[in-house]
Amino acid sequence: SLQYLTESDVLFLCKIPVYESAGTKLSGKLFEYLHMRKPILALTLPGLTAEILSRSGLGIVVAPQDRLGIKGALQHLYRQHKVDHLPAVADNAYIQRFDRVDQSRCLSQIFDQLVRHQGQFQPTHHGEKR
């Protein structure tokens, strides 16, 4: 529930790896967590999820099978929590790119452009100024 996320100091994302698609599939939960602007401990393989978490400034990414890495990440977060200094320097501009309202507006603009130009479509990347 959203209340649990709001009350949490650290969010936990466990992406069970399917090796063939580990680098390309994204969980909706990832974007809910980014919106919270809190540290995220993620057990996942290298790929899009790890890249997004790294760029967001919120992620601590550990491979799901790395027991020592998981232990170290938990100890680090616990020590930081004890001194009331959990690391979370969010890149708000980057995270905003994934906002549902912004994504819907971008998609609407693409549809409008397609209708106006009847297939002569020139895509613009979200956040890019023309």
Image (cartoon, grey):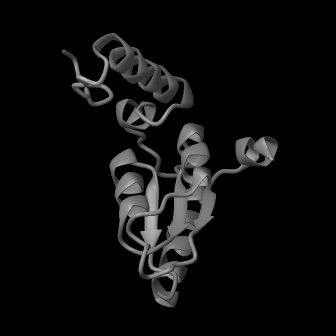
Q: Relative to the observer, which residue lies in front, 43 or 87? A: 43
Side (left or right) of 11 relative to 124: right
Give the left or right position of residue 120, taking residue 67 as reference. Answer: left
* Residue sitting at x 33%, y 29%: 126
Expressed as whole percent of the image width and height from the top left, the position of residue 7 reads 75, 45
Can you name the residue that lies furthest to the left here?
Answer: 130
Q: Is residue 77 above or below residue 105?
A: below
Residue plotted at (54% across, 63% down): 41
How many marks on residues? Answer: 0
x, y percentage for residue 130? 18, 15
Q: Nearer the viewer, residue 32 or 72?
A: 32
Q: In the picture, residue 62 is in which quadrant?
A: bottom left
Q: Residue furthest front?
A: 118
| Most foreground residue, 109 or 9 | 109
Question: Is 83 drawn above or below residue 107 in the view shown?
Answer: below
Looking at the image, which is closer to me, 68 or 79? 68
